[in-house]
Image (cartoon, helix red, strand yellow):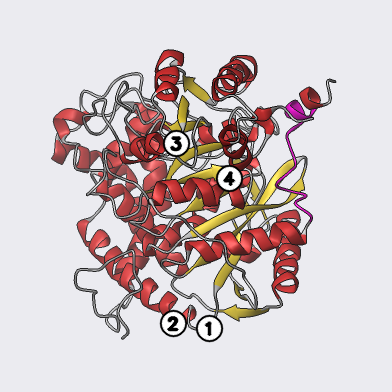
Amino acid sequence: MEALNSAGDFIPAALAAFGVEADEIELAVMRAAHEALWPPILELLALDTSAFASERDHDLSQAPPRR
Amino acid sequence: MSEPLDLPLREQAAAVAAGQVGAGELLEAALGRIEARNPALNAIVETFPERSREMLAAAPAGPLHGVPVVIKDEWPLPWRAQRFGAAEMPAETTPGESGPYRALRDAGAVIVGVGNMHELGASSTGNVSVYGPARNPWNPERCPGGSSSGPAAAVAARLVAGAVGADGVGSIRYPAGYCGLTGVKPTFGRSAMDGHHMAGVSTTIVSGPLCADAGDCRLLASVLFGKELRAGDAKGLRIGVIEDEVSEDVAPAVREACEAAIEELRAATGGAVRTIELPELAAATLATVLIANSESLGGLNPERLNSLDPELSPLGRGLLKYRLMLPAAATVKSHQVRTMARQRLAEVFEDVDVIAWPTLPAVAPPLEAPMVELPSGTLTADAANVRGGALANLTGMPAISVPVGSSEGLPIGLQLQAAWGRDELLLDAAEALERANGRRWVEAVPPLVAAEQTGA
């Protein structure tokens, strides 16, 4: 999958954009995190949530209002 | 006869109140036991005997009067800022009166030590900490669970009978499961939270109790809630189970123990077991991770990330830097998933009272390599554990982990989750389960404790 394989490009590019330095071990940690998280993140972005209206001022101590 | 320190939290409190046990004697016994047992466990990272004695001298006649307890390294004390298990905090911290500290103090409790925790609260294992890892009293080469590793190890080793942890993504329930304890993740917002460095920012973290059994959790949770959680019964309990990876992609021994416990609970309450569906669970798990990670970004910027303390672990440094790269669109989507999951759960809780599944898919993994073998293959413990722990934090609902079995000499936990505000029902259900199994698992103690109790 191209997005997954791009970790080697994405991470150095993102670090450069933020001006953040990283050593080899940190880069390895970031690559591992990226490979684990990126594919499900792409799936999450593709998820259709349109049937669920956002809760306004949601209160996590209570049940949501009935739909 | 048991040492007073071996009594349950509520019995220690009753014995002190009745004058059967001296509170000073109890405090010194706890300090002595920490000195004796803690070096092998690293559960407690700091004691402050004079402060503890001062707390006792000033202790009011509350429900925990004169009872020693431990608090996680996530809460400030008037004499000590929290370190979050890390060489460097993502936010500035100073000593002060946190909500849990005030609740304990006003209940008359005596804080005898600070419990270790996983660095930055970032793992379910507890195997990385600026203090060195805490160790599981059931097997010191195994993970105690995280991030409330020290509080759990301290209670499991009977250094104290109760500890206050924090749960942002399973961080009370994971160590409860690994250490054979009962641990409560309260409904969001119900337990004391102020003074936490992420209070007002985090929408997942709560304080909660770790104790041997549900009765002690009821008492300690009542203190943290500022409200007595009265006992009821769980008669006719409707138990929801799912046929999904959180229930099925688990080690066979864990699955058997949890299925047996669910059946015991059903029989004990005269209830029923129903299969439910939560198709959003996988998305909800990722959404929880993304929300929790994005909420911790406030104190970070490139300049700060370029000057991180070299004593922070390479894993911690790498993950802090990676958080900057998480796309905002995914966090926004995560909040939509939160809405979706909450609405689905609200519908589910019209048909069931609790949802049950294994707290953890396997027993505590080795500290040196926290991986677990599951039917689907070998996974990092964190990747496997989060599947069962995240939903309660995402949605705000309460959850409890109760000990229900053992494999390889290591505890197995069952998680029960209920609708918002039904924390008491979870305690009622846990107590019903304890009665049904003859309190076999809540009274089990690790070998190192058993050896001392029998004088071996």
Front label number (4 vs 3): 3
On the same chain, marks 2 and 3? The answer is yes
What's the distance in space between the residues labelled 1 and 3, CA to CA? 43 Å
Secondary structure category for the residue under label 3: loop
Q: Chain of mark 1?
A: B
Residue at 37% of width from left, 51% of height from top? A5
Residue B272 versus residue B14 in the image, above or below: below
Secondary structure category for the residue under label 4: helix
Residue at 62% of width from left, 69% of height from top? B233
Which label's residue is closer to the chain start, 4 or 3?
A: 3
Q: Is residue A1 left or right of residue B124?
A: left
Instruction: Pinpoint residue B19: horizontal percent, then vertical percent.
Output: 60, 30
What's the distance in space between the residues labelled 4 and 3, CA to CA? 29 Å
Q: Which residue is disc 2 drawn over?
A: B347
Category of crowding for the residue at label 2, using alpha-carbon neighbours closer than 10 angstroms: few (below 14), some (14–19), many (at least 20): some
Which label's residue is closer to the chain start, 2 or 3?
A: 3
Instruction: Pinpoint residue A10: horizontal percent, then vertical percent.
Output: 26, 46
Q: Chain of mark 4?
A: B
Secondary structure category for the residue under label 2: helix
Front label number (1 vs 3): 3
Q: Which residue is disc 4 drawn over?
A: B176
